[in-house]
Image (cartoon, rainbow, N blue to C red):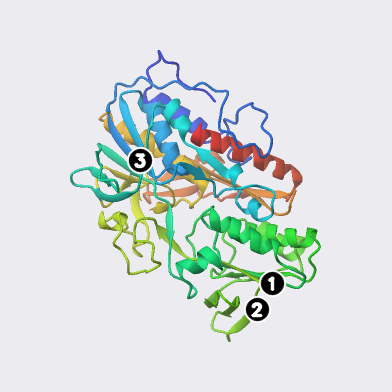
């Protein structure tokens, strides 16, 4: 990784070159690794966020106050790079309800006892100590986009020049389930935490002949390959621990596999043949959280019934802060909705200018990560990329300029298929001026009309690289 020396002016051009390097363009068409992987010789599962790289804040002369709401992959990256590229006179405040971040990436391996929840816990202390980000642990209750003020639950108002909103997602009503059902009986575990531990314990309790049922909501949803990956690692666990005649049933509301279709179809048909049963176009799914009876139909077909031991329903989601957490689709009393940010056609996401991630509903408000709808998939690596592009755009705007007219983003993801093999998927996205949208590109981001690149094979080497990719990504975000 390289940075601009303290005595060198950090111009928009040099920052863009730094950004392009950080986005991994030099390797994007060949591997999903970040191009600036460090030389720490990390162990696969080491989760420290210390780094051997010394980063110096740029000297830009730009001043102001940027408030960042949400300290996940997108928000943390934005806060870090706002300070790193914006300089010491640009004050950045990061607000999050939790003292640390629990990574959703790799959390499927908690289900197979190959990871612990503690190994996925990331502190934000380095953002404060190394970059001067002000950390506030509290809950946002309102966002006044006219007077440019964020109000916290403790009554403190925070004024801003620009605000970055990265709240993640909240879950919607589905399958006849209540919040308490997800928390105690049928966990979705689509936000890493207590539900992940609950689901892991339920899987550990499965016996010979038991059935595991999971559901996949209609896209878009967080981490497109994640559900298929989960099905694979659960099937692998059941096989290698000698639990015979078990089934993993995947009820997908989508018409087809949403990511790495070749890899996962191969995994379902061959690697985990006889264990995984994949059903697309699943409709009218209903779940009894007490009896674990699942009913569904395929298309317009007759209702079918499964008697499961473990049910893992992943409900549809929307930008966090739209409702008050009751799973009521009609509840739009949250601060995100009150500020008018959920302006997509289905009222679930924020529409943004893909050059800056500025909301199309409110000036000075930038929405990044899973809450935004801009043409990029909802994923952790992408959130990191959006945080950097947004930071660069805000710095340009505060300096009296315009956002980069040709932003490029890299998306990468590894998916474990068994306990020691994995696949990967990578894509480069660039801004299409004719469409005004971010689109998948080809030739390293130079031409449009490309497609995501999928690993040619499932291999142990990919599994090893997965650990390096993950450690590098987390260091780039939190260290």
Q: Secondary structure at mark 1?
A: strand
Give the residue pinned by disc 2.
307
Quarter of the rendering occupied by the N terminus: top right
Left or right relative to 447: residue 466 = right
Q: Residue furthest top?
A: 7
* In contact (CB < 8 Å): disc 1 and disc 3: no
Give the residue drawn at x 64%, y 52%: 110
Select label 2 or label 3 by which is in front. 2
Where residue 113 sits: x, y (%)?
69, 52
In this view, the residue in front, 348 or 431, is 348
Does the image show residue 429? no
Give the residue drawn at x 58%, y 44%: 120
Few, some or many C-alpha atoms within 10 Å of disc 2 (few <14, some 14-19, many ≥20)?
some
Query: Nearer the N terminus, badge 1 or badge 3?
Result: 3
In this view, the residue in front, 128 or 168, is 128
Give the residue pinned by disc 3.
68
Where residue 70 sits: x, y (%)?
40, 45
* In contact (CB < 8 Å): disc 2 and disc 1: yes
Does the image show residue 128? yes
Q: CA distance from mark 1 to mark 3?
A: 43 Å
Q: Secondary structure at mark 3?
A: strand
Query: Nearer the N terminus, badge 2 or badge 1?
Result: 1
Q: Which mark is residue 211?
A: 1
Query: Nearer the N terminus, badge 2 or badge 3?
Result: 3
Q: Secondary structure at mark 2?
A: strand
Few, some or many C-alpha atoms within 10 Å of disc 1 (few <14, some 14-19, many ≥20)?
many
Q: CA distance from mark 2 to mark 3?
A: 45 Å
């Amino acid at each position: 990784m390289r940075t601009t020396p303290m005595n060198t002016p950090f111009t928009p051009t040099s920052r863009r070159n730094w950004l392009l390097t950080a986005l991994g363009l030099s390797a994007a068409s060949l591997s999903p690794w970040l191009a600036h992987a460090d030389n720490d010789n990390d162990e696969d599962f080491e989760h420290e966020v210390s780094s051997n790289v010394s980063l110096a804040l740029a000297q830009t002369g730009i001043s102001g106050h940027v408030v960042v709401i949400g300290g996940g992959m997108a928000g943390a990256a934005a806060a870090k790079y706002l300070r790193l590229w914006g300089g010491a006179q640009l004050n950045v405040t990061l607000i999050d309800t939790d003292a640390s971040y629990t990574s959703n990436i790799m959390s499927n391996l908690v289900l197979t006892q190959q990871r612990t929840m503690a190994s996925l816990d990331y502190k934000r202390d380095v953002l404060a100590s190394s970059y001067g980000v002000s950390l506030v642990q509290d809950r946002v209750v309102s966002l006044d986009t006219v007077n440019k003020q964020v109000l916290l639950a403790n009554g403190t108002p925070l004024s801003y020049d620009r605000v970055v909103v990265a709240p993640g997602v909240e879950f919607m009503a589905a399958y006849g389930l209540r919040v308490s059902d997800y928390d105690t009986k049928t966990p979705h575990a689509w936000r890493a935490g207590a539900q992940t531990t609950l689901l892991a314990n339920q899987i550990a309790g499965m016996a010979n002949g038991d059935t595991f049922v999971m559901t996949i909501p209609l896209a878009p949803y967080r981490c497109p390959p994640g559900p298929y990956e989960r099905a694979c690692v659960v099937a692998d666990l059941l096989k290698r621990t000698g639990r015979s005649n078990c089934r993993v049933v995947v009820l997908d509301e989508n018409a087809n596999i949403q990511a790495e279709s070749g890899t996962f179809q191969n995994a379902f048909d061959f690697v985990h043949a006889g264990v995984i049963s994949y059903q697309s176009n699943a409709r009218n799914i209903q779940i009894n959280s007490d009896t674990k009876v699942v009913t569904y139909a395929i298309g317009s077909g007759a209702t079918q019934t499964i008697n499961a031991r473990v049910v893992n329903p992943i409900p549809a989601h929307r930008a966090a802060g739209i409702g008050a957490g009751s799973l009521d689709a009609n509840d739009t009393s949250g601060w995100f909705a009150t500020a008018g940010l959920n302006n997509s056609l289905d009222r679930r996401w924020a529409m943004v200018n893909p050059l800056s991630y500025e909301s199309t509903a409110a000036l000075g408000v930038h929405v990044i990560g899973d809450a935004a709808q801009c043409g990029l998939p909802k994923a952790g690596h992408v959130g990191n990329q959006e945080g950097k592009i947004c930071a660069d755009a805000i710095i340009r705007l505060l300096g009296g300029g315009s956002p980069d007219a040709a932003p490029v983003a890299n998306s990468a993801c590894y998916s474990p298929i068994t306990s020691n093999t994995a696949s990967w998927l990578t894509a480069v996205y660039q801004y299409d001026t004719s469409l005004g949208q971010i689109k998948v590109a080809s030739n390293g981001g130079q031409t449009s009309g490309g497609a995501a690149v999928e690993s040619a094979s499932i291999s142990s080497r990919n599994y090893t690289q997965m650990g390096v990719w993950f450690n590098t990504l987390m260091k780039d975000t939190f260290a």
